[in-house]
Image (spheres, rainbow, N blue to C red):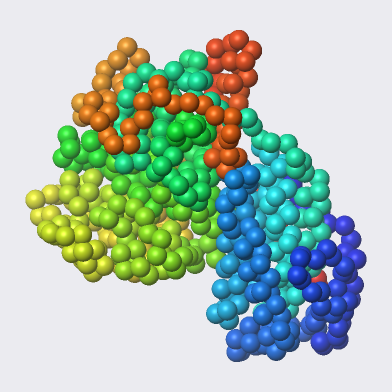
């Protein structure tokens, strides 16, 4: 971790008299920005603590500042929010992270509830996003630093006064911006992260399945067994939809999520190369088992919770959590798959708890862009109210109910509209013909609270782990052990091969409307960066192949994220003005 070590501030730290005007440090301006030559600095020794709304007092102290800031925030958001084909996936995700923060600042100004906590946590979070990117790409960290610096300069006038009027020490945001500027200058900007993969590198073995979004094949890359997903270009005509799974692939790194090796495009389709999971989706397993025993269910849902927490902290809502998107292999190892309908949200790249991250859980978005499978949608989604990461936790509750009982919580509907009304009402009953423990019922009830703020994990994600339903679960063991528990019935859903158990392919899948034969796929040299991703392991594999060596699964496997470094209470503490 890079330590924040500023040079001695050039700004006078001597306490000024009340409302004395002190010249601002000279900084590079954004296009269209007008620098106000003086900034109001409040008395340092005697803190102002107003009983009324702080924003109202700040507005009086800085007339016109809110209007100017919102104007610049919208210019900033317009310049960085739309997909650009020249950006690589992680670069675009960084742009979206800073962009979403800018829009949240704008909303806070408009609603008169912007707080210094949001400003501090927001900029601090962007610092850790930059830190997260640096080990693998200084190009990405430079983008994070450059955009965050611009955002700091937009909010500089308001931030310091808002801190002071809230009764806390001001942060020298000018110096913070200078540090971000130094990070951007010291990083590499011009080197592309990787060369696009090509379909000819892979040897297709057999068809595994097909659905509304394309076809899945088992394939080989050297000696590495992998899964190839083929999605016809005609299904994803908008860049924001075509790139979303690439964004997820560029950020996630968890044993509870399917590992992506490479994403690229051909003349006919978008191609994704993923790890090959010798398992069965829980939707198929449920048809054989009818219901999942509670001791097995506990292991499954614990892993689902870990998967969702990782996705959320990296800045994504899954939006289609259901049994069919959970693959379980021998030993009850579970992985969440299918990121085609994911949505970018504000992540949490700092390890410590953040108040604003928890506040966003129930509702972060107020649009009508709803995706997912209707029986698993949360009430706020079917009623088109504000939604956030809590929708995934509701879906986790429905999934748990479904696996425990073999049936969905909302039944006896004739139309989709009736189902949506039942979901909106949020009322369901546990079946009387099943023995369900009190802890399991309470766990599902906590996840399926109708009001998102009352839902489990809406206050803090730790509430998931400490729920009595997970009593006895060894959480660290979940991520380090492949054989978690034996479940013999799973073998009935898999095919026995020389190399072990494998998923059974779908014979009828080949007749699907959007099926593209691998033999008809033609590589192209006209790649768009936004649709191109290669993991570090995949790059190693290509180097091995180019050098005439045969890569193995060890070559392509990257270590998972594991950072337990202690973090300070406030990363910019040394920039505080006392």
Identify the residue shown where x is 41% and y is 49%. Answer: 341
| In this view, 271 is above or below 364 | above
In this view of the protein, can residue 163 be seen by the observer?
no
Identify the residue shown where x is 87% and y is 69%. Answer: 25
Q: Position of residue 35 (x, y in %)?
A: 81, 74
Identify the residue shown where x is 75% and y is 70%. Answer: 32
Please tell me which residue lies in front, 198 or 343: 198
Please tell me which residue lies in front, 124 or 149: 149
- Quadrant the C terminus occupies: bottom right
Q: Image quadrant of residue 268?
A: top left
Q: Position of residue 183 (x, y in %)?
A: 78, 50
Q: Position of residue 225 (x, y in %)?
A: 43, 20
Please tell me which residue lies in front, 453 or 153: 153
Q: Is residue 256 left or right of residue 394?
A: right
In this view of the protein, can residue 371 be seen by the observer?
yes
Q: Image quadrant of residue 532?
A: top right
Q: Image quadrant of residue 49?
A: bottom right
């Amino acid at each position: 971790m890079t330590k924040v070590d500023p040079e001695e501030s050039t700004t006078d730290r001597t306490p000024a008299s009340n409302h004395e005007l002190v010249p601002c440090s000279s900084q590079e301006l954004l296009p269209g920005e007008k620098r106000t030559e003086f900034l109001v600095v409040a008395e340092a020794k005697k803190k102002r603590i107003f009983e009324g709304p702080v924003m109202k007092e700040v507005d009086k102290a800085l007339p016109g500042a809110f209007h100017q800031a919102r104007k610049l925030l919208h210019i900033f958001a317009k310049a960085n929010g739309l997909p650009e084909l020249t950006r690589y996936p992680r670069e675009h995700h960084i742009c979206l992270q800073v962009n979403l923060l800018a829009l949240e600042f704008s909303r806070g100004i408009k609603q008169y509830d912007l707080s210094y906590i949001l400003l501090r946590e927001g900029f601090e979070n962007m610092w850790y996003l930059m830190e997260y990117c640096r080990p693998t790409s200084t190009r990405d960290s430079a983008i994070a630093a450059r955009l965050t610096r611009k955002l700091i300069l937009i909010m500089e006038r308001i931030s310091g006064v808002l801190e002071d009027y809230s009764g806390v020490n001001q942060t020298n945001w000018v110096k913070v911006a200078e540090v971000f500027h130094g990070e951007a200058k010291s990083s590499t900007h011009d080197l592309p992260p990787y060369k696009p993969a090509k379909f000819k590198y892979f040897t297709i073995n057999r068809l595994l399945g097909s659905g509304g979004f394309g076809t899945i094949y088992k394939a080989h890359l050297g000696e590495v067994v992998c899964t190839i997903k083929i999605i016809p270009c005609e299904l994803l005509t908008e860049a924001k939809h075509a790139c979303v799974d690439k964004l997820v692939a560029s950020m996630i790194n968890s044993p509870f999520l399917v590992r992506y090796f490479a994403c690229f495009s051909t003349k006919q389709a978008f191609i994704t190369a993923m790890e090959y999971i010798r398992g069965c989706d829980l939707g198929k397993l449920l048809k054989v088992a009818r219901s999942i025993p509670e001791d097995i269910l506990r292991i499954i849902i614990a892993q689902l919770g870990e998967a969702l927490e990782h996705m959320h902290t990296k800045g994504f809502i899954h939006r289609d959590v259901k049994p069919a998107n959970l693959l379980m292999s021998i030993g009850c190892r579970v992985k969440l798959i299918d990121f085609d309908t994911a949505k970018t949200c504000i992540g949490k790249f700092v390890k410590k708890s953040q108040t604003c991250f928890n506040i966003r859980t129930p509702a972060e978005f107020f649009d009508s862009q709803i995706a997912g499978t209707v029986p698993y949608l949360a009430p706020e989604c079917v009623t088109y109210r504000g939604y956030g990461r809590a929708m995934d936790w509701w879906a986790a509750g429905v999934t748990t109910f479904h696996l425990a009982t073999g049936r969905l919580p909302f039944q006896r509907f004739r139309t989709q509209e009736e189902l949506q009304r039942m979901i909106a009402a949020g009322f369901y009953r546990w079946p009387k013909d099943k023995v369900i423990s009190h802890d399991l019922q309470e766990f599902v009830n906590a996840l399926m609270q109708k009001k998102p703020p009352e839902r489990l994990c809406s206050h803090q994600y730790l509430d998931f782990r400490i729920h009595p339903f997970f009593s006895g679960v060894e959480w660290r063991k979940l991520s380090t052990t492949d054989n978690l528990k034996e479940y013999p019935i799973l073998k009935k859903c898999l095919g026995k091969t020389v190399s072990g158990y494998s998923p059974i392919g779908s014979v009828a899948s080949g007749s699907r409307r959007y099926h593209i034969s691998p033999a008809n796929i033609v590589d192209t040299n006209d790649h768009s960066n936004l649709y191109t991703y290669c993991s570090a392991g995949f790059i190693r594999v290509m180097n091995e192949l180019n050098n005439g060596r045969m890569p193995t699964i060890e070559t392509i496997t990257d270590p998972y994220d594991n950072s337990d470094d202690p973090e300070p209470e406030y990363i910019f503490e040394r920039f505080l003005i006392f």
